[in-house]
Amino acid sequence: GENVEQHPSTLSVQEGDSAVIKCTYSDSASNYFPWYKQELGKRPQLIIDIRSNVGEKKDQRIAVTLNKTAKHFSLHITETQPEDSAVYFCAARQAGTALIFGKGTTLSVSS
Amino acid sequence: DAGVIQSPRHEVTEMGQEVTLRCKPISGHNSLFWYRQTMMRGLELLIYFNNNVPIDDSGMPEDRFSAKMPNASFSTLKIQPSEPRDSAVYFCASSLPPEPQHFGDGTRLSIL
């Protein structure tokens, strides 16, 4: 089955800096890669996703890149703000299956 | 839409007791997922259903765990008998593929 590795487990940045979180997946049949943000005590919420027919997707300060050959994808947050502090999860799945999640990255943005 | 609804939000019980967690998916979604979240193991997939049929239950820890989906608007996850190591936050999620999964607010379970 699918296995998703996520790095780093913790990330501390200064407000205004960029943050990058990286994930690798094992199943070459996976074709959907979302990113979820989870604030303390709350549910994971989708912030951006990408499908395997696209190499990059951007939404304001957030972007995701996908390298199918290397089986890795990354989340990029620019101009970080304190409210970006949360746990971020990457995930992967192939059609008709469930999302398999990475272990999460705790992002701390200090002002 | 009210989103995915889980109950109870919090459950504290003694080991050996039966625990039942409940989930109402978003109307129209035909896929439902149960996840368990702990600090050590992250978000683990326990089981998922498509059109009320269990598709993959390989993540269910052991025979003490069981899940049912009697109709398109209701699912239960049952633990019997419960043990302290079952303490975790249990999330239910639903989707209408290929759309993303939407999570409920979770049930925080504490087994004493």
Image (cartoon, coloured by chain):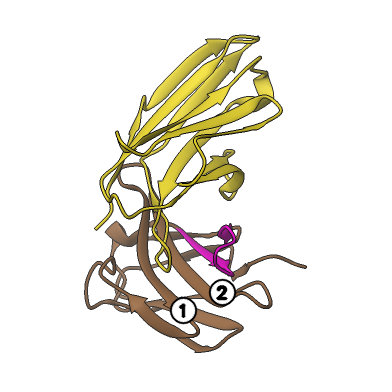
- Rendered image quadrant of residue A1: bottom left
Asked if residue B98 is among those painted magenta in the image, a careful observer would answer yes
Asked if residue B82 is among those painted magenta in the image, a careful observer would answer no
- For the point 54% across and 24% down, the residue is A76
- For the point 50% across and 84% down, the residue is B51
Q: Nearer the viewer, residue A91 or B87?
A: A91
Q: Position of residue B15 (x, y in %)?
A: 31, 68
Q: Secondary structure at mark 2?
A: strand
Chain ID at mark 1 = B
- The chain displayed brown equals B
Q: Nearer the viewer, residue A75 or B94?
A: A75
| Dot 2 amino acid type | Cys
Mark 1 lies on residue: B50
Q: Position of residue A17 (x, y in %)?
A: 59, 9
Mark 2 lies on residue: B23
Q: Colour of chain A?
A: yellow
